[in-house]
């Protein structure tokens, strides 16, 4: 995720508790989504759950990117 910000991500994970929390949440959602997709039984409810998780993951990614952009300009 965001290879152009690799160094800044490492710095923020070490120094910014909020960023680290968002980053960890994003990674946990990614693992959960991959796990659910790997065991998908084509149940409609399961697909809806996966889509909801993907939306939350994208929301977190957007927040992380905004922080990276703002910090990178500072």
Image: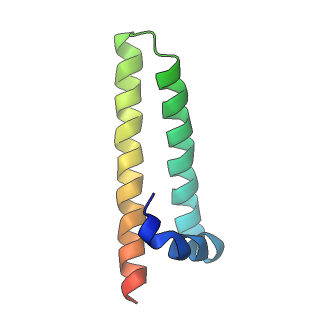
Would you place residue 31 above or below residue 17 in this image? above
Q: How is the image coloured?
A: rainbow
Q: Nearer the viewer, residue 33 or 7?
A: 7
Q: Quadrant of the C terminus?
A: bottom left
The answer to which quarter of the image holds residue 2 is: bottom left
The tally of labels here is 0
Which residue does the image show at 40% across and 28% down from the upper left? 50
Residue at the extreme bottom: 74
Q: Quadrant of the N terminus?
A: bottom left
| 31 with respect to 62 (left or right) | right
Which residue does the image show at 38% across and 65% down from the upper left? 65
Looking at the picture, how far across and down is residue 58, in whole percent? Answer: 36, 48
| 6 with respect to 56 (left or right) | right
The answer to which quarter of the image holds residue 18 is: bottom right
Looking at the picture, how far across and down is residue 68, in whole percent? Answer: 42, 73
Which residue does the image show at 51% across and 31% down from the upper left? 34
Looking at the picture, how far across and down is residue 41, in whole percent? Answer: 45, 9
Which residue does the image show at 53% across and 67% down from the upper left? 19
| 57 with respect to 20 (left or right) | left
Residue at the extreme right: 14
Would you place residue 24 above or below residue 14 in this image? above
Would you place residue 26 above or below residue 7 in this image? above
């Amino acid at each position: 995720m965001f290879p152009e910000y690799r160094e800044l991500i490492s710095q923020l994970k070490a120094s910014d508790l909020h960023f680290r929390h968002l980053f960890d949440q994003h990674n946990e959602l990614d693992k959960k989504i991959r796990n659910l997709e790997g065991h998908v039984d084509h149940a409609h409810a399961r697909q809806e759950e996966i889509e909801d998780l993907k939306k939350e993951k994208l929301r977190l990614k957007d927040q992380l990117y905004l922080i990276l952009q703002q910090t990178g300009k500072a």
